[in-house]
């Protein structure tokens, strides 16, 4: 490796041992902020360079910064997952990409760039969805760090990591089964970073109500008097897609064919009402609820996340406890606080889930509750149950015959007080079991929120 000689303007050779001196200063001596378990030793650098395996989820604005930061911190064995390809609009902030890379997979281009730029780096790309891998894939990593722009993807990955926690015969957690998550997110000039240690700190589902609500337009405006390009896109997404069902599936915001179909229909709708401004990028933003990214915010949040990965891997300093928010809208502001675990969390607790309804509750009421509740916020739940020892599908969006069950009472479908339903949803890799409790006439209805 070579660098400019500041004294003579020429080049000097930097030895491999000198390359990591800035890291050695942190790992080979202790300090006032060191974790109580930290042992200063050259072995710490040896571990992060040769043994520690880190998974980066997302190779976009945050992901590019994370890959660069981790490689320069000495994490040479990194894998990255991203299902997206490079768009020309990415180039203003996703600095690992060039104009010649447009159309190529983000994960592959980012990995190649880091491997060429940082000596010894062995970044392995995965051009696919996170859902394409099972728990065996995620178990191989010491730490997972996320730079996602999707709440649904965060929830799925959170559910996967939580489901990997194992317990011994005494009911105690097996420490080796815990894989920490470092999660970062940005929204324009605002951002956040957090550490999730399964069974010890709150997970994504514990704090689901922290995520901002999506912006909704009045349905009457969308259907009859559209005035904005967003109205045209929402018309296609909410009304036209279910009616025409072009791909015989629900909308996938990461599928270019789905976005392109919505874009073309939105342009037709806009032309009809003489509305301008419908673009492919806007269509993708409305469908995926994307807020435009700011490079400086990405850099700040990625640096926090990479630092926390370094602290988790080495114990050289106490980690974040456990949620940090950042804003540079007016000046620079940051605040760290300890978010609290939910004792009844659907993902990270061991408690059973019980939901209460009036005796005349219908299956549609249950689905509405699961999708509208701030605690569950499911997308398109499928519901099954077991009656007389046999599994019965009550509702599944892709099975048209089950639609007739939506207006039927649970009691008519064979679910008595104390009965159980099993729910599957795209927000989690595992199914969830709920016990149904019917309220007596005198009991006020109190559903968990």
Image (spheres, rainbow, N blue to C red):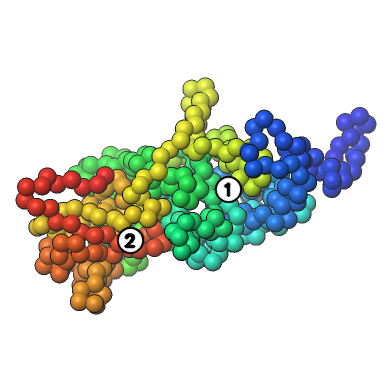
Q: Is residue 191 left or right of residue 447?
A: right
Q: Are marks 1 and 2 in contact (CB under 8 Å)?
A: no
- Camera-side mark, 1 or 2: 2
Residue positioned 60% across, 37% down in the render: 318
Q: Is residue 317 left or right of residue 191?
A: right
| Local SS, label 1 | helix
> Which residue is nearer to you in this view: 241 or 410?
410
Task: Name the quadrant of the C terminus.
Answer: top left
Q: Residues within 10 Å of mark 2 (few under 14, many from 20)?
A: some
Q: Earlier in the sequence, mark 1 or mark 2?
A: 1
Q: What number is the disc on residue 208?
A: none
Residue positioned 26% across, 75% down in the render: 391
| Local SS, label 2 | strand
Asked whether residue 259 is in view, the answer is no
Pinpoint residue 353: horizontal percent, then vertical percent. Answer: 29, 55
Q: Is residue 184 left or right of residue 424?
A: right
Residue positioned 73% across, 56% down in the render: 50
Residue positioned 33% across, 49% down in the render: 344
Asked whether residue 296 is in view, the answer is yes
| Circle 2 residue | 432
- Residue found farthest to the right: 8
Q: Residues within 10 Å of mark 1 (few under 14, many from 20)?
A: many
> Which residue is nearer to you in this view: 171 or 282?
171
Pinpoint residue 261: horizontal percent, then vertical percent. Answer: 38, 59
Q: CA distance from mark 1 to mark 2?
A: 31 Å
> Which residue is nearer to you in this view: 151 or 75?
75
Pinpoint residue 325: horizontal percent, then vertical percent. Answer: 48, 33
- Residue found farthest to the left: 441
Q: As displayed, is residue 262 above or below residue 92? A: below
| Circle 1 residue | 63
């Amino acid at each position: 490796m070579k660098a400019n000689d500041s004294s003579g303007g020429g080049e000097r050779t930097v030895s491999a041992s000198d390359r990591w001196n800035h890291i050695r200063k942190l790992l080979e001596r202790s300090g006032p902020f060191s974790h109580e378990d930290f042992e200063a030793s050259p072995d710490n650098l040896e571990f992060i360079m040769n043994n520690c395996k880190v998974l980066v989820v997302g190779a976009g604005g945050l992901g590019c910064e994370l890959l660069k930061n981790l490689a320069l911190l000495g994490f040479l064995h990194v894998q990255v997952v991203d299902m997206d390809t490079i768009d020309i609009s990415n180039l203003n902030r996703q600095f690992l990409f060039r104009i010649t890379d447009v159309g190529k997979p983000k994960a592959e281009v980012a990995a190649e760039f880091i491997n060429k730029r940082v000596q010894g780096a062995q970044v392995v790309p995965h051009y696919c969805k996170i859902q394409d891998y099972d728990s065996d894939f995620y178990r191989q990593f010491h730490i997972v760090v996320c730079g996602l722009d999707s709440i649904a993807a965060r929830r799925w990955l959170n559910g996967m990591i939580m489901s990997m926690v194992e317990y011994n015969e005494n009911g105690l957690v097996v420490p080796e089964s815990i894989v920490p998550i470092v999660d970062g997110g940005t929204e324009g000039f605002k951002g956040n970073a957090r550490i999730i240690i399964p069974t010890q700190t709150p997970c994504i589902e514990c704090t689901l109500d922290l995520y901002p609500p999506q912006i909704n337009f009045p349905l009457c405006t969308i259907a009859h008097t559209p005035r904005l390009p967003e109205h045209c896109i929402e018309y296609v997404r909410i009304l036209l897609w279910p009616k025409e069902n072009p791909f015989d599936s629900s909308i996938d915001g990461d599928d270019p064919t789905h976005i392109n179909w919505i874009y073309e229909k939105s342009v037709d709708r806009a032309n009809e009402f003489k509305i301008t401004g419908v673009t492919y990028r806007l269509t993708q933003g409305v469908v995926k609820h994307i807020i435009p990214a700011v490079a400086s915010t990405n850099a700040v949040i990625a640096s926090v996340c990479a630092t926390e990965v370094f602290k988790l891997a080495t114990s050289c300093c106490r980690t974040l406890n456990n949620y940090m928010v950042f804003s540079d809208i007016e000046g620079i502001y940051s605040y760290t606080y300890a978010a609290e675990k939910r004792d009844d969390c659907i993902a990270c607790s061991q408690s059973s889930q019980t939901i209460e309804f009036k005796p005349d509750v219908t299956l549609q009421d249950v689905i509405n509750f699961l999708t509208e509740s701030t605690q569950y916020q499911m997308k398109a739940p499928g519901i099954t149950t077991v009656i007389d020892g046999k599994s019965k599908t009550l509702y599944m969006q892709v099975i048209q015959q089950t639609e007739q069950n939506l207006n039927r009472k649970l009691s008519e479908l064979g679910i008595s007080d104390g009965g159980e339903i099993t729910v599957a949803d795209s927000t989690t890799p595992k199914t969830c079991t709920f016990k149904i409790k019917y309220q007596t006439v005198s009991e006020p209805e109190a559903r968990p929120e």
